[in-house]
Image: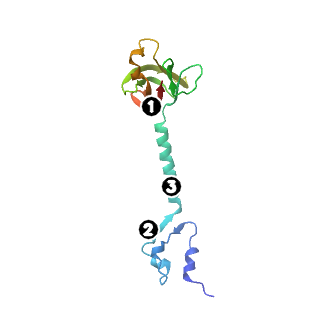
């Protein structure tokens, strides 16, 4: 039995060049090697090139992650700094804390917290300016809002203070996160 000439293409240089034959270009009257003679360079993939592109992609992704690595943070709203339980609903008698743990925060920074009332007006702005040593792995900051102590007494203006509030967290003027809570 005589072997067909089409069988030779599988014996030539295995593992170095792979021919991809699109279904639309297959003509049963003409052998596949001749029908793709002109287009063959466009349908070949060299084995080493794919690996190179993969390595370049991984390198670029890693470089982007290293460049964007900066301080990270985790914040909660709570009413007691001794028992850090996240809460989203507070009474008028509670002191409301935005407690934040920073990791990788070094040097001089300004942390700002805006307390926004239900009528969308800023009630208070808390600014914390610190120079944080590189020896401190985790820096803790907190800002609070209180309705019953200090200058703020809500009894004549209760309707402005009851309802959904927002606390907005900024680092060096850059917005980081917003926290929703309710005052009843």
Residue toward you, 18 or 163: 163
Q: CA distance from mark 2 to mark 3?
A: 18 Å
**Mark identifier at residue 52:** 3
Mark before the other along the chain sequence, 2 or 1: 2
Q: Tag 2: Cα neighbours inside 10 Å, few (<14), some, or many (≥20)?
A: few
Measured as percent of width and height from the top left, residue 132 is found at: 49, 21
In terms of image quadrants, where is residue 85?
top right
Residue 66 lies, with reference to residue 76, above or below; the image says: below
Residue 65 lies, with reference to residue 130, above or below; the image says: below
Q: CA distance from mark 1 to mark 3?
A: 43 Å
Q: Is residue 173 visible?
A: yes
Q: CA distance from mark 2 to mark 1?
A: 52 Å
Q: Which residue is mark 2?
A: 42
**Mark identifier at residue 178:** 1
Measured as percent of width and height from the top left, residue 50 is found at: 51, 58
Mark 1 and mark 3 residues within 8 Å of each other at the beta carbon: no
Residue 44 lies, with reference to residue 64, above or below; the image says: below
Q: Residue furthest top?
A: 150
Q: Secondary structure at mark 3?
A: helix
Measured as percent of width and height from the top left, residue 24 is found at: 45, 74
Q: How is the image coloured?
A: rainbow
Residue 118 lies, with reference to residue 30, above or below; the image says: above
Mark before the other along the chain sequence, 1 or 3: 3
Badge nearest the viewer, 2 or 1:
1
Q: Tag 3: Cα neighbours inside 10 Å, few (<14), some, or many (≥20)?
A: few
């Amino acid at each position: 039995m005589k072997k067909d000439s089409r069988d030779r293409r599988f014996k030539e240089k295995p593992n170095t060049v792979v021919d991809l034959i699109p279904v639309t270009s297959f003509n049963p009257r003409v052998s596949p090697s001749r029908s793709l003679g002109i287009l063959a360079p466009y349908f070949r993939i060299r084995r080493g090139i794919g690996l190179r592109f993969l390595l370049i992609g991984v390198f670029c992704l890693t470089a982007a992650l290293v460049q964007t690595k900066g301080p990270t943070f985790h914040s909660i709203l709570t009413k007691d700094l001794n028992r850090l339980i996240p809460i989203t609903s507070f009474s008028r008698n509670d002191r409301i804390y935005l407690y934040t743990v920073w990791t990788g925060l070094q040097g001089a920074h300004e942390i700002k917290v805006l307390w926004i009332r239900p009528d969308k007006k800023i009630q208070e702005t808390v600014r914390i300016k610190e120079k944080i040593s590189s020896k401190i792995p985790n820096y803790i900051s907190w800002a609070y809002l209180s309705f019953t102590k200090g200058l703020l007494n809500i009894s004549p203006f209760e309707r402005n203070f009851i309802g959904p509030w927002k606390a907005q967290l900024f680092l060096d003027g850059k917005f980081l996160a917003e926290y929703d809570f309710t005052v009843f």
